[in-house]
Image: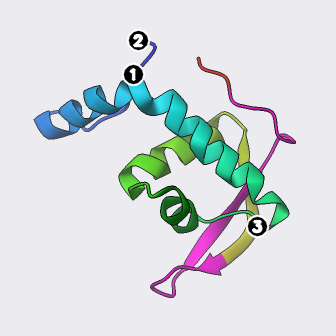
Amino acid sequence: MDNYVPHIEHSPTSEAAAITIAPLTGRLLTLVYRYILGCGESGATDEEIQIALNMAGSTERPRRIELLARGKVRDSGRTRPTLAGRAAVVWVDAEGGEEPHEK
C-alpha cells in the first residue's frame, strides 16, 4: 500500500486518523524536511519544527522519523532545551539538501 501510515492495531480511532492523514503525508514530509534543511547546521528540535510549522507533534514526529529512516536527517549529537526545559535532540540534514522522494 503506497499511502500506508502506521497506526495502533485494534484502535479504531488510530486507524481512522491514519486513513485521514495518508493522502497528506508526502506534502507534510516535504514541509518538515524543508524546515530542517532551512535551519542549516543549527538544526531544529521536534518542538521547534512543530511550532514553526504549526503542526501537532503526532503529525510532525512521524514525518521526522520517516526522514530519519530514509537517511535524510540525522541526530546532530547536540540537544537544546524544550519549552519545558528538557533536553531535545537537534536534527540536521544528512544528505546535503536533496528533496525526499515518494516511495
Q: Earlier in the sequence, mark 3 or mark 1?
A: 1
Q: Which residue is mark 2?
A: 1
Amino acid at the residue labelled 3? Gly
- Please state, as top left, top right, bottom left or bottom right, where the C terminus lies in the image: top right
Q: Secondary structure beneath disc 2? A: loop
Q: Residue at x 42, y 30 (%)?
A: 24
Q: Secondary structure beneath disc 3? A: strand
Residue 4: mark in rendering = 1
Front residue of 31/42: it is: 31
- State the CA–CA distance, disc 3 to disc 2: 34 Å
Q: Which residue is mark 3?
A: 77
Residue 24: mark in rendering = none
Q: Residue at x 41, y 57 (%)?
A: 57
Point out residue 33 in the picture as x, y percentages from the top left corner.
66, 44
Highlighted range, magenta: 80-100
Point out residue 42 in the picture as x, y percentages from the top left corner.
79, 68
Front residue of 21/81: it is: 21
Question: Looking at this rendering, what residue extends furthest in the bottom direction?
Answer: 85
Front residue of 32/4: it is: 32
On screen, residue 61 versus residue 68, left or right, reads left
Q: Earlier in the sequence, mark 3 or mark 2?
A: 2
Q: Residue at x 51, y 67 (%)?
A: 47
Amino acid at the residue labelled 2? Met
Point out residue 12 in the picture as x, y percentages from the top left corner.
12, 34
On screen, residue 60 versus residue 35, left or right, reads left
Q: Is residue 37 magenta?
A: no
